[in-house]
Image (tube, rainbow, N blue to C red):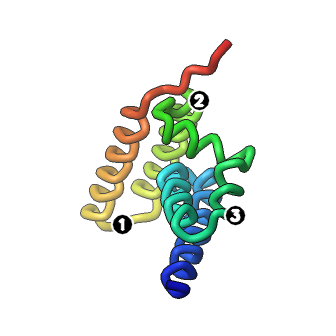
């Protein structure tokens, strides 16, 4: 039981770290990684789960997604824009193999679809 709890905390912390990096690097999906971290913490550490949910910067990602409220339009626009800027740079200037370029374009298309299909968060005025 102790080993399982420890592994869940480690996976949760790694997921949380990647999610924080994903805030700045659009190729790393922030919300799914935060959800994974929350799922690990809820099964292993009440203290870490409560901290994550009540964190003023990270908590809203989880709460809005979990409550089905969606994500802000500005986050969608920024996410898709940064995603394709970095994908196109990589496809055009970094990767020489056509099959990898096509794979990257497919991954970019999938994450664009995933972001755009999410409900847009409407802020109360």
Residue 80 lies, with reference to residue 20, above or below; the image says above
Which type of secondary structure does the marked residue at label 2 adopt?
A: helix
Q: Secondary structure at mark 1?
A: loop
Q: Nearer the viewer, residue 31 or 29?
A: 31
The mark that comes first in sequence, 1 or 2, is 2
Which is more N-terminal, label 3 or label 2?
3
Residue 119 figure quarter: top left
Residue drawn at x 25%, y 63% is 99
- Residue 5 locus on image (x, y percent): 54, 78
Whether residues under marks 1 and 2 lie with C-beta atoms below 8 angstroms apart, the answer is no
Q: Residues within 10 Å of mark 3 (few under 14, many from 20)?
A: few
Find disc 3 in the rendering and name its residue. 47
Above or below residue 125? Residue 41 is below
Regarding residue 15, the answer to whether it shows in the image is: yes
Residue at the spot of label 1: 96
Q: Residue at x 52, y 49 (%)?
A: 31
- Badge 1: how crowded within 10 Å, few (<14), some, or many (20+)? few
Q: Residue at x 46, y 57 (%)?
A: 90
Q: Is residue 125 left or right of residue 115?
A: right
Image quadrant containing the C terminus: top right
Q: Nearer the viewer, mark 1 or mark 2?
A: 2
Name the residue nearer the viewer: 12 or 24: 12
């Amino acid at each position: 039981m102790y080993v399982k709890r420890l592994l869940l905390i480690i996976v949760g912390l790694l997921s949380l770290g990647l999610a924080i990096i994903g805030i700045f690097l659009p190729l790393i999906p922030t919300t799914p990684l935060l959800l994974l971290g929350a799922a690990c913490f809820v099964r292993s550490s009440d203290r870490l789960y409560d901290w994550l949910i009540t964190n003023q910067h990270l908590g809203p990602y989880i709460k809005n997604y979990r409550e089905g409220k969606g994500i802000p339009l500005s986050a969608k626009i920024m996410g898709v824009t940064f995603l394709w800027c970095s994908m196109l740079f990589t496809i055009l200037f970094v990767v020489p193999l056509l099959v990898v370029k096509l794979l990257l374009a497919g991954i970019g298309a999938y994450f664009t679809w995933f972001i755009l299909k999410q409900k847009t968060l409407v802020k109360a005025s």
